[in-house]
Amino acid sequence: MKKSLLITVALLLMVFLVGCLDYKAYEAPAGDDAELLSEIEQLEKELAAEPETVEEDVVLPELTEETPETISEVPSELKIVTIKENELLKLNVKANDPDNDQVTLTFSKPLDVNGQWKTTYGDAGEYQVTITATDGKLNTEQKVKIVVERVNVPPVIGDVVNIAVKEGEVVNFEPVVTDPNGDPVNVDVSEPLTSGTFATDHTSAGEYSIIVSASDGELNAEKTFILAVTDVNEKPVIVGVENLNVKEGDKVEIKPTVTDLDNDNLVITISDPVGDDGVWLTEFTDHGEYQITVTVDDGKDVVTKKITLVIEDVNMPPQIIEIGLASN
């Protein structure tokens, strides 16, 4: 614009000078004319120094049916939808077309094709989704923020069943615990399964109520089951007796040592001719071999021990027991 104005002024000045002066007889003017010529020269220099601006044509892309143009609607405030974990989100989107064209809606993840999303525990957070409306030629997009609020639920303890074992067996137990929110869980099991292993022995018979508890720091869960340990009788043990060899006239003593791990009440018997007191004073007519049985009964089992008792004959000289007159 500036360049055109300067050219116009310069042309007008030149026409004015040619019209007023004889070109061939022209001499350097004095006074105001000289100043005017100087200004014209200055204008010509500025015009020569200023680069010429070339205006380029703007080419707009052609719209085709294969590539619909997308127009993003930018609302003054981003639409926010709030739900809670484990709820079903259903977006109700309405769209129209000024040309009465058919409009198709599409939704970005995590929404499905119907604009719905069944949330679950652990989905808490913010999600930005894009809703696109298209008439096959032009697309319109709008962003929506979905806020899923956390809902804490207690840990879940897997199924537990009663356990039955016999004394002497080893019990292994490890509970299965999960947390729908994905929180870290602290799990405790009551005695005697605190460590997860219980090696039973002869004193373990009985029923135990086992409590399994789990906590995520806010909410707790608990389950109980029965551990039944069946008594297995420990039979009495007889020691301290062995086969005996004595002579007639000797005293026989059988004193068995009996132990019982269950500490049951024991009944001890010794067969004849020794007897339950375990003492027999032999005579000179008792020589021979005897099988002596020691029996222990704990009320559940009977244990026996066989002993061979040999009594050697001892020959004694005849005895004169009476002297008197013989009758005729």
Image: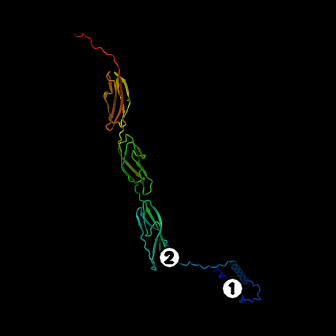
Picture quadrant of residue 282? top left
Image position, residue 239 (x, y; %): 38, 31
Residue at horizontal 49 percent and vertical 74 percent from the top: 139
Which residue is nearer to you in this view: 28 or 119?
119
Quarter of the figure that contains the C terminus: top left
Q: Is residue 58 left or right of residue 224?
A: right
Residue 299 against residue 277 in the figure, above or below: below
The residue where tag 2 is placed is 138
Foreground tag (1 vs 2): 2
Neighbourhood count class around disc 2 (C-alpha, 10 Å): few under 14, some 14–19, many 20 upward: some
Residue 190 against residue 61 in the figure, above or below: above
Residue 192 against residue 29 in the figure, above or below: above
Which residue is nearer to you in this view: 33 or 71?
71
Dot placed on the residue nearer the N-terminal end, 1 or 2: 1
Q: How many marks?
A: 2
Residue 224: which disc?
Answer: none
Quarter of the figure that contains the N terminus: bottom right
Residue at horizontal 37 percent and vertical 25 percent from the top: 245
Residue at horizontal 50 percent and vertical 76 percent from the top: 138
Which residue is nearer to you in this view: 323 or 293?
323
The residue where tag 1 is placed is 11
Element marked by disc 1: helix
* Three-letter amino acid code at the position of disc 2: Leu
Neighbourhood count class around disc 1 (C-alpha, 10 Å): few under 14, some 14–19, many 20 upward: few
Q: Residue furthest left?
A: 328
* Three-letter amino acid code at the position of disc 1: Leu
Image position, residue 63 (x, y; %): 53, 78
